[in-house]
Image (cartoon, rainbow, N blue to C red):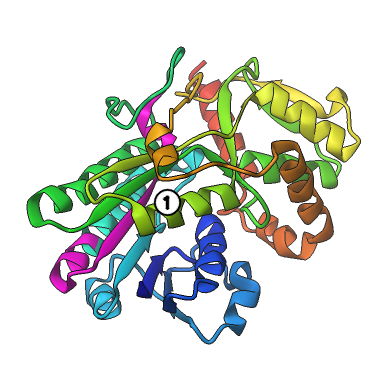
Amino acid sequence: MERVLVTGGAGFIGSHFVKRILSADDVAEVIVLDALTYAGHRENLGEAFLSPKLTFVHGNILDAGLVDTLVKGCSAIVHFAAESHVDRSFFAAGAFVTTNVHGTQTIADAAMRHGVKKFVHVSTDEVYGPLPHGSASETAPLRPTVPYAASKAASDLIALSYFHTYGVPVCVTRSSNNFGPHQHPEKIIPLFSTRLLRGQQLTLHGDGLHVRNWLHVEDNCAGIELVLRDGVPGEIYNLAGGTDLTSKELTARLLKLMGADWDSVVHVPDRRSNDIRYSMCGQKAAGLGYRPVRDFEEGLEQTVDWYRRNPDRWAPLMRNPQAAAVTLSAAMRSEEEAHA
């Protein structure tokens, strides 16, 4: 692969992938392009900066000139950069469309001009929308219900259109909910963990019976690398096979790990468009040899322990009102109460 561009490589999933791909013998250079917004931090890359293979560029995927310069000479692109938090998309839908759709088109344009050998676009199971029963294959219709998921579905279609129209060797991966160390505390596992560490209550939406599939970030990154190497251009690969849990079941596990009880939990009105269940089948990725290997319980315990041992990494983020999920949740509740 020689030279690989990773967009969003200082984010949660992107930084785990960068560390993984740096260890590959056939990779001579990894260029990370990251805008370092609230969810992207150089610290996420940590020891990766010790590698002479790593080049870090602070910049935006919407900067077409910069993107063109970086893509030139690259053999592959792995595109993580995106706005990714559902709650935020309710209040900033335009930013999600701009970054996720226009940004993807900017990257794809450069890939087309410079003839990259593989372009992996990283997406989510949320594009399929809620599935009360059954599981979505890669050919299932896209039925997103929130601006975030809709912007990702649109970006998937933009990326794939560059394969069908221009022959850009695009593959799309769609994974379920990722978890692991150094995820931003707006996401439920780090949010609940850090709130319990601070002695605060947890807010559980509705009846807590919404089902999500949980996949360790390292398993997702293994699947993305597999698709990068062996995926067929023009194909979509569901990276499924994690652990299905309701929000209530996940909360119970976190309470147990933190030594807390249900007195720490407050039920609040359900979030708008809170899809009841996501589910994918992943036979196509399995055909490439993909198998998640991380045990959920062990991975969750290690993740919680990371937040317990590293308050210096997440505590400063809670001081930023634009980065705190609790601020958004409070705003949403206030708005819902005003319209009740």
Viewer-proximal residue among 320 and 218: 218
Q: Is residue 124 magenta?
A: yes
- The amino acid at mark 1 is Glu
Q: How many marks?
A: 1
Q: Quadrant of residue 78?
A: bottom left
The residue lying at 85 percent from left, 38 percent from top is 257
Measuring from the top left, give residue 70's x and y in whole percent. Answer: 30, 78
Measuring from the top left, give residue 321's x and y in whole percent. Answer: 61, 53
Q: Residue furthest right?
A: 259
**What range is drawn magenta here?**
108-129
Measuring from the top left, give residue 57's x and y in whole percent. Answer: 42, 79
Measuring from the top left, give residue 104's x and y in whole percent. Answer: 27, 56
The residue lying at 64 percent from left, 25 percent from top is 245
Q: Is residue 47 above or below residue 146?
A: below
Which residue in the protein does label 1 denote? 83
Helix, strand or loop at mark 1:
loop
